[in-house]
Amino acid sequence: MQITRNASLTQMSIRIRPNPRLSAWSAAARSIASSSPASLFRNSLQPVAHDEAQSDSKNVRMLRMIMFGKPGAGKGTLSGRLVKKYDILSLSTGDLLRMHIQDKTEIGRMAKEIVAHGGLVPDELMLQVVTSKLDHLHNKHWILDGFPRTLAQGELLNTHLNKQNTPLSLVVNLDVPDDIILSRISDRWVHLPSGRVYNLSYNPPKVEGFDDETGEPLTKRPDDNPEIFARRLEKFYSTTSPLLDFYARLSQTRISPPPHRHPHQHPHQLAFHTKPPHRLMVQSISGTTSDEIWPQLERVLKDAFPGLKERVDSADIRRKHSLSDAIAAASVAASMPSK
Ligand code: AP5
Ligand code: MG
């Protein structure tokens, strides 16, 4: 199947070339794709405004990023590549929910049926799941993959982060055509405990059917069948894609960080703004292969966040740099008796 859009980006024409392997996926997605909003298909790599950087206490501009995109666009894969190379943590709400489901927690019990049918877990519950992790991450660079997914989640997240004076700094929209996504999903295998993602043609495991790092068997995600995937794509167009306009509007707004106060300063004494105002950056990256997408993504991050450090320690590289690791490490450290 080949999907093309006309120059005005307001209409779409679909040409079908029979491909037996993809026919089930394609048929299910066709009606959904035709209702996609134009706003989703911008490609606007804009120059980066360094002077509007939001900095942490060490004056390093912090990456607080949303990896945005359709199901199967490569959010998990690219976040994984970034955290492997740079000192960044990532949090995938899909991975988190799958862990809750596997561990049969209260949240897992509530989410199980919804995820299995390609629906969306209620906003308040999701915010709770996410903020309980994010609140541990002051002065860390992080990426959110799969959250927010509704306007309400976007607004809740924004309010929460602004209250903490840790506003979002970057939204990256991965703009990948539907027909490419459909072929990827039919080839996707995952290691559920870690969230590691493989693809038989793009990044196959070293030993077919087994995870590279643990040697454990790979599985298909239960929500990766054509019918459920079509529903997820439909949910994306109807409910998630309006977030792009929300973030485009936010990117027009400057937020002034609170004025700096000395700890011993009298409350009536004047305090001054020592940091420049913050502005959210929104970037769309289009492409069909990693060769097209990865260099663009890296360039955006390197230009806008020059303080991002590459990982050097090989032991560090081998670790899974997930948010849960960082939080587990922090709680172990906190439980150690102080010297
Ligand atoms: P989630 O797990 O987040 O699923 P998703 O958003 O549908 O996205 P995917 O994980 O399917 O795709 P991806 O973009 O990560 O792509 P990937 O890197 O794997 O959520 C699952 C469910 O949880 C939801 O349906 C919902 O029910 C619930 N949920 C989660 N968050 C929620 C929220 N905030 N609110 C409410 N409910 C929520 O790549 C796909 C394939 O392509 C792979 O095989 C990969 O190897 C391959 N690939 C990737 N990049 C490339 C490339 N450049 N070239 C070639 N192949 C590539
Ligand atoms: Mg994913």
Image (tube, helix red, strand yellow):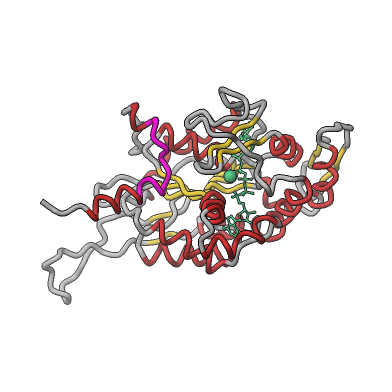
- Name the residue rendered at 74%, 35% in the picture: 183
Chief secondary structure of the magenta span?
A: helix
Horizontally, is 209 left or right of 214 in the view? right
Residue 312, percent across and down? 32, 28
The span picked out in magenta is 317-327
Q: Is residue 325 left or right of residue 103?
A: left
| Quarter of the image where one finds residue 150 | bottom right
Could you say which is closer to the camera, residue 126 or residue 248?
A: 126
Where does the image place residue 303, in percent across and percent down from the top left? 42, 36
| Vertical arrangement, residue 124 with respect to residue 6, above or below | below
Count of labels in the image: 0
Q: Quadrant of the N terminus?
A: top right
In the rendering, at what x and y percent does residue 162 appear?
Answer: 40, 64
Residue drawn 66% across the image and 40% down it: 220
Q: Quadrant of ligand 2?
A: top right
Q: Position of residue 17 (x, y in %)?
A: 88, 32
Q: From the viewer's perspective, is 68 left or right of 56?
A: right
Residue that sits furthest to the top in the current view: 206
Q: Is residue 324 magenta?
A: yes
Residue 78 among magenta residues: no
Residue drawn at point x = 66 percent, y = 61 percent: 114
